[in-house]
Image (spheres, rainbow, N blue to C red):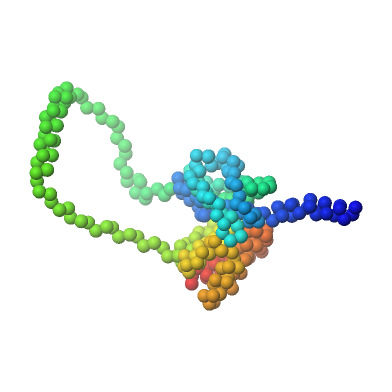
Amino acid sequence: MAERFRLALLCWLLPAALGAQVRAVASFDRAQVEAGDTAVLRVQVAGVQAAPQRVSLGAWLPTVPSDHLRTRSAWRRTGEYWVQTISLLLLDTGRLTLPPVLVHLQVGEPVPTNPVEIAVVAPAVPADIGAMAPLRDIRRHPAAWYDDYWPAALPVLAAGLLALWWWRRRRRARPVPSTAPAPEMPRPSARELALQQLDALAQQKPWTSPEGVLEYYAALSWIVREFLQAQYGFPALEMTTAEIAQTLKRTAAPWADEAQRLLQQADWVKFANAHPKSRAHEHWLDVARRLCSH
């Protein structure tokens, strides 16, 4: 009898234990956008084998209407988690604090993400706006004598246009001088782009609020993985931290251990609910800067 009771208790507790391992993380690709621009929301889900069904943005409808949803990617597997990106059009200026969204799974209850924040600023105003001439009122002109004769002039105008077309057709075509295309602006390198993103993250300081710590480490991990993928040519965004560490060791990079420790720290915060000390946040930001400077 006792053995049956223990077996039943184990069967009852096992789904709850497995469900507790499922974790969803949401973060924006930028901390600040201009009004009228699109921001990309990245949703990561760990602890499930099958792809989630959908992400419900119903909690955001008072702030982000449904017609502001631009694109929604398919779920893709990147290492130990599923990732979906959603692009949104943001129009209202101010600092938006958006509540958690629900990720509906194939089996079980929906999983909430963390709250996210983003700053929406007004577009920059030209510096010489004060030099613009004032708008003038509409000036109405009196009717002219020729206003009543323009219908009769239409056949004459058509005949003139036909004669001009015939004359141009009989002329010998002149070669059109080719113009050199305008030089393209040089695109920033992977190092420059990563350092710009890290500087923006440092100015925003999302770790100063409890709900921003998770978003900070998710963004930090993403920036470093994007840099490694663009700079060294291996799919870091689709690899686990262990796979990235093995790849870097094969390249004999002297900073491979430091990169592994940074990505492991971010994984512990995102998926193990770790709480680093406050002085550790800027330390890992400095580590990311050193990695992206190589």
Q: Is residue 255 above or below residue 71?
A: below
Q: Where residue 30 sits in the image (x, y, percent)? A: 51, 54
Q: Say whether residue 146 is visible.
A: no
Horizontal relation, residue 256 to residue 13: left or right = left
Residue occupying the point 59% across, 50% down:
116
Compare residues 111 and 48 and report the one nearer the observer: 48
Determine which quarter of the picture holds residue 62.
top right
Q: Where residue 168 sits in the image (x, y, percent)? A: 11, 43
Compare residues 130 and 8 and report the one nearer the observer: 8
Compare residues 270 and 173 and report the one nearer the observer: 173
Residue occupying the point 20% across, 24% down:
142
Residue occupying the point 56% across, 75% down:
249
Horizontal relation, residue 48 to residue 64: left or right = right
Figure label count: 0
Q: Say whether residue 234 is visible.
A: yes
Residue, far right: 1
Q: Where residue 128 sits in the image (x, y, percent)? A: 34, 49
Q: Is residue 189 above or below residue 54?
A: below
Q: Where residue 250 sits in the image (x, y, percent)? A: 54, 75
